[in-house]
Amino acid sequence: MSEPVSEDHMLAQGLLGEDEAGLIGLADTPAYLRRAMRVDEATRQIDRRCQELREKIAGEIRLRLKTWNKLVADRPNLAARLSPATLAALAAIEEAVFIGAEPRTLRDRIPWPVLPHRIWRNLAGAVAAYNLKWNAGLAAIDLGPLGKEIAGYNKHYLFEKECAFRSARIARIGFTPMAPVDAGWLAARWSALPPLPESMG
């Protein structure tokens, strides 16, 4: 079962004007709004697949990050050896792969000899391996259904809205044709993780 249409999401996507959102869900929802809803749902389907892919392949990075974070908690001076760019990359990786209140640090001691450089290399290697799987997974996602809905939206939305309001001028208010989607669009929307240097520095 698909999730309920999010009016906020559709507003953010530019598919609706604020004065139109209240029409969603009515028994006689206009055709032009149903068309916008289909674009929104097709986009959400893509987002769900990307989130599922991330969940599927992020396990090793989570473990490596928890290990690194435990090491830094025990030895705070290690973080000072990282450049600001590397610290920013670590923060972005954490934000991408952890969910909600999930612990981001091992609760117990590291269960093997503490070798900071090896732990860092393992983390950097896990990020590189993740990105290879991520890029392959994105390439396998079919953008055809979304592209079809966008093409229909661009072709028919104005006419359907004009029929609803009996005014070409009103129909054009706030309308902007949507750009076609491609691999670049998907990679920008769901980017790979920033790479980490092999050495701590």
Image (cartoon, rainbow, N blue to C red):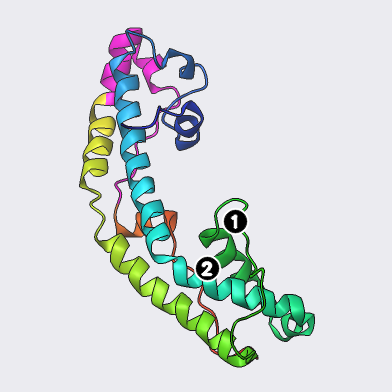
Q: Which residue is drawn at 50% across and 35% down?
A: 12
Q: Name the residue type under label 2.
A: Arg
Does the magenta-highlighted stretch encompass residue 159?
yes
**Segment tinted magenta in the rendering:** 157-181
Residue 156: numbered disc = none
Mark 2–mark 1 distance (CA, rounded to whole Å): 10 Å
| Residue, far right | 77
Q: Is residue 189 above or below residue 165?
A: below
Residue 136, by quadrant, is bottom left
Of 65 and 201, which appears nearest the observer?
Answer: 65
Which callout, 2 or 1, points at the residue further toward the start of the chain?
2
Q: Do the residues labelled 2 and 1 touch (CB within 8 Å)?
A: yes
Determine the image quadrant of residue 161.
top left
What is the crowding at mark 1: few (fewer than 14 residues within 10 Å), some, or many (at least 20)?
few
Q: Residue at x 58, y 72 (%)?
A: 65
Whether residue 166 is situated above or below residue 188 in the rendered picture = above
Residue that carries the numbered disc 1 in the rendered image: 102
State the count of labels.
Answer: 2
* Residue bearing the label numbered 2: 62
Q: Residue 115: percent from the left, percent from the top? A: 63, 92
Q: What residue type is labelled 1?
A: Glu
